[in-house]
Amino acid sequence: MIYLQLFLTYLKIGFFGFGGGYAMLSLIQNEIVVKHSWITATQLQDIVAVSQMTPGPIAINSATYVGYSVTGDVWGSIIATFAVSLPPLTLMMMIAHFYMKLYSNQFVKGIVSWLKPMTVGLIGSAALMFANGQTFIDWKSFVIFGVCAVATWFRFNTIYLIILSAIAGIFLYL
Amino acid sequence: MLLDLFWTFFKIGAFTFGSGYAMIPMIEREIIDRKGWFDRDDFRNQFALAQSSPGPIALNTAVFVGYKMNGYKGALAAVLGTIIPCFTIILLIVVFLSGYKGNPYVEAAFKGVRPAVVALIAVPFIRWMKDLKWFFMIISVAVALVIWLTNLSPIFFILAGIIIGVVSVSLNIKKR
């Protein structure tokens, strides 16, 4: 039952998705690419690129995209998007309700301080997993990577960066 | 009120690109300056919690603002407002792109984009890692390498972070 699997998988991603979009990518990759093979790592990477140019969080965008590609209909998209939003919705409402107590709670502070190195590590693993043979096909890809890394370091606009590297790709690889 | 919440977050959802942090200026302008739903300190404190809670930061922000304004109905209205624009756009793109599978222009463009995506993720990793204390820095690099080499689920490390966090605080309390 593909719809149920899709629902449960994205529910899990929503529930353990600490640390923002890039950190969640590691989790999405593990569930969608490694465990279920619904899409390839390269496809996920392309979704990230599209997601950077379109509004909305990567987790939601990937749910919509994967839901459609796996089932071939809109219901897959709706179910996956709903599932990934459900845990944040319920958890965050509880947090909003108790937030005065939580904000100064030392256990919350302890958890947050130990989650930080974990989520930073997840971001690193996402970068490593995308840095594969499909990405670095020749010396030109390394040049694109180097230029983009320097540009990102100096906080060049992400949308322009994707558009410019797409144009570079058309010139270099067509 | 519900419609107002929905519409405000619809606009925020439709115009914030990239990460959740990119939407802070817009959200503050709409929620604090224009609507006066929050005062700035209150908003920033709750935003800090929204960051540490699981799920996309944009979504978590929608939940706590909506919840404060109109309980769970408000949270739901704000979340729908945030999701609907990006859901629609991605759905259009996936339907449109599947028609272009194998198109040489699209293929070449993605070949150029893929190294850029790696740079977009690697640079924030380096930046955030640099800001950690050296002990946490080693942990973060080790976590990245272990997941990459073994395909171990990231959930394992999230749970480890939560457990170690609780244990370390408990030990501190005992000591005092």
Image (cartoon, coloured by chain):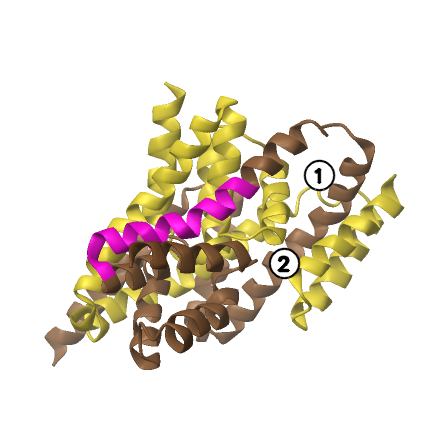
Task: Tell me the residue at 72%/30% (across/down).
Answer: B100
Q: Which residue is mark 1?
A: A134
Give the label on residue A47, or none.
Answer: none
* SS of the residue under disc 1: loop
Report if residue B2 lies within the magenta region: no
Task: Tell me the residue at 77%/43% (across/down).
Answer: B109
Labels 2 and 1 touching (C-beta < 8 A): no
Q: Tell me what hue chain A is rendered in.
A: yellow
| Viewer-nearest residue: B147 or A7 | A7
Q: Amino acid at mark 1?
A: Gln
Q: Chain of mark 2?
A: B
Q: Position of residue A32 (x, y in %)?
A: 48, 34
Q: Tell me what hue chain B is rendered in.
A: brown
Q: Quadrant of the C terminus of chain B?
A: bottom left
| Viewer-nearest residue: B147 or B78 | B78
Look at the picture and state if A153 lies above or below A22. below
Q: Which residue is mark 2?
A: B120
Q: Position of residue A107 (x, y in %)?
A: 20, 68
Position of A53 with respect to B80 (left or right) is right
| Viewer-nearest residue: A22 or B28 | B28
Q: Which residues are magenta?
A: B70-89
Q: CA distance from mark 2 to mark 1?
A: 17 Å
| Viewer-nearest residue: A94 or B68 | B68
| Few, some or many residues within 10 Å of mark 1 (<14, 14–19, 20+) | few
Task: Tell me the residue at 44%/57% (across/down).
Answer: A20
